[in-house]
Amino acid sequence: MSEKKPESPLKSWAKFSTIAIQMGVTIWLGNLFGAWLDRKFETEFLEPVVSLLAVFLSMYVIIRAVKSLNS
């Protein structure tokens, strides 16, 4: 059996900063897409709805990523 080496703090920090950047970009793109849909269909409710869906999607991805880091 091989023992796992503990990760360096810098490597862990890089993984978590990547997750934060991914979350921000996902929400930002969801907001842009929602605004585009509002302009295209002449509505006012799609931007907040799509932005909220992007928040839920990014939280789901973050939870999966953190779970994989802990296992």
Image: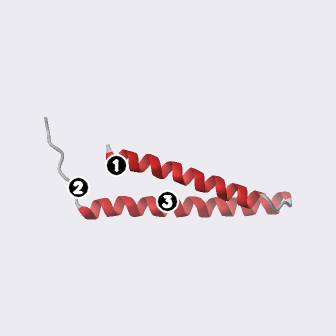
Cα distance in 3D space between marks 1 and 2? 11 Å
Q: Is 7 placed left or right of 68 in the picture?
A: left
- Residue 58 locus on image (x, y percent): 54, 54
- Residue 69 locus on image (x, y percent): 34, 49
Cα distance in 3D space between marks 3 and 2? 22 Å
Check residue 18 in the rendering and tell me which mark sits there, or answer none. Answer: none
**According to the image, label 3 marks what residue?**
22
> In percent of the image, x 64 and y 52: which residue is there?
53
**According to the image, label 2 marks what residue?**
7
Q: Of callouts 3 and 1, which one flags the residue occurring earlier in the amino acid sequence? A: 3
Q: Of callouts 3 and 2, which one flags the residue occurring earlier in the amino acid sequence? A: 2
In what quadrant of the picture does the C terminus appear?
A: top left
> In percent of the image, x 66 and y 59: which residue is there?
51
Q: Of callouts 1 and 2, which one flags the residue occurring earlier in the amino acid sequence? A: 2
Question: Which residue type does callout 1 highlight?
Answer: Leu
Q: Is 47 placed left or right of 15 in the picture?
A: right
Mark 1, residues whose alpha carbon is within 10 Å: few (<14), some, or many (≥20)?
few
> In percent of the image, x 74 and y 63: which residue is there?
35
Asked if the residue under mark 2 is in contact with the one under mark 1, i.e. CB atoms within 8 Å, the reply is no
**According to the image, label 1 marks what residue?**
69
Helix, strand or loop at mark 2: loop
Question: Which residue type does callout 3 highlight?
Answer: Gln
